[in-house]
Structure formats: structure tokens, C-alpha cells
Image (cartoon, rainbow, N blue to C red):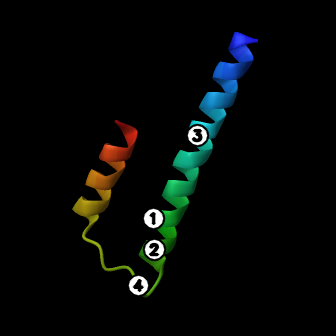
């Protein structure tokens, strides 16, 4: 049971990370992309801590 709970937690974290990567990639390819890359990196560092 505990192993399964850990796996589900990990799967949710991976899904969130993949969504964030997809979101940034979409922004980069859109006409609305105006963030400096350093701000995006700082945002990801804050989210992972």
C-alpha cells in the first residue's frame, strides 16, 4: 500500500512537471512570449523547492 501511494505521488509530480514544460514550450512558440529565460528558470527553481 505504501509503495503504491509513493508511486501515485511520484506520478502526479512527473505529470505536473511535464505540464509545466509543455506550458513553457507553448509560450516560447506563441506570439505572447515576452519573458526573459532567467525569470522562467527562477520560477521553476522556486516550484521544485
* Badge 3 or badge 4: first in the primary sequence: 3
* Residue to which mark 2 is pinned: 27
Question: Relative to 15, does residue 40 appear above or below in the rendering?
Answer: below
In the image: residue 41, left or right of residue 21? left
- State the separation of the CA atoms marked 3 and 4: 26 Å
* Badge 1 or badge 4: first in the primary sequence: 1
Task: Say which element carries label 4.
Answer: loop
- State the separation of the CA atoms marked 1 and 2: 5 Å
* Residue to which mark 1 is pinned: 24
Q: In which quarter of the image is the N terminus?
A: top right
Picture residue at 31% right of the left edge, 60% below the top? 40
- State the separation of the CA atoms marked 1 and 4: 11 Å
Picture residue at 45% right of the left edge, 74% below the top? 27
Picture residue at 68% right of the left edge, 24% below the top? 7
- Residue 36: x percent and y percent? 24, 70
Task: Say which element carries label 3.
Answer: helix
Task: Say which element carries label 2.
Answer: helix
Question: Relative to 10, does residue 14 appear above or below in the rendering?
Answer: below
* Residue to which mark 4 is pinned: 32
Evaluate if marks 1 and 4 touch, with contact meaning CB atoms under 8 Å apart.
Answer: no
* Badge 2 or badge 3: first in the primary sequence: 3
Amino acid at each position: 500500500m505504501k509503495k503504491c501511494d509513493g508511486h501515485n505521488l511520484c506520478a502526479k509530480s512527473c505529470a505536473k512537471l511535464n505540464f509545466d514544460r509543455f506550458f513553457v514550450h507553448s509560450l516560447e512558440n506563441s506570439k505572447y512570449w515576452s519573458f526573459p529565460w532567467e525569470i522562467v528558470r527562477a520560477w521553476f527553481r522556486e516550484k521544485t523547492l
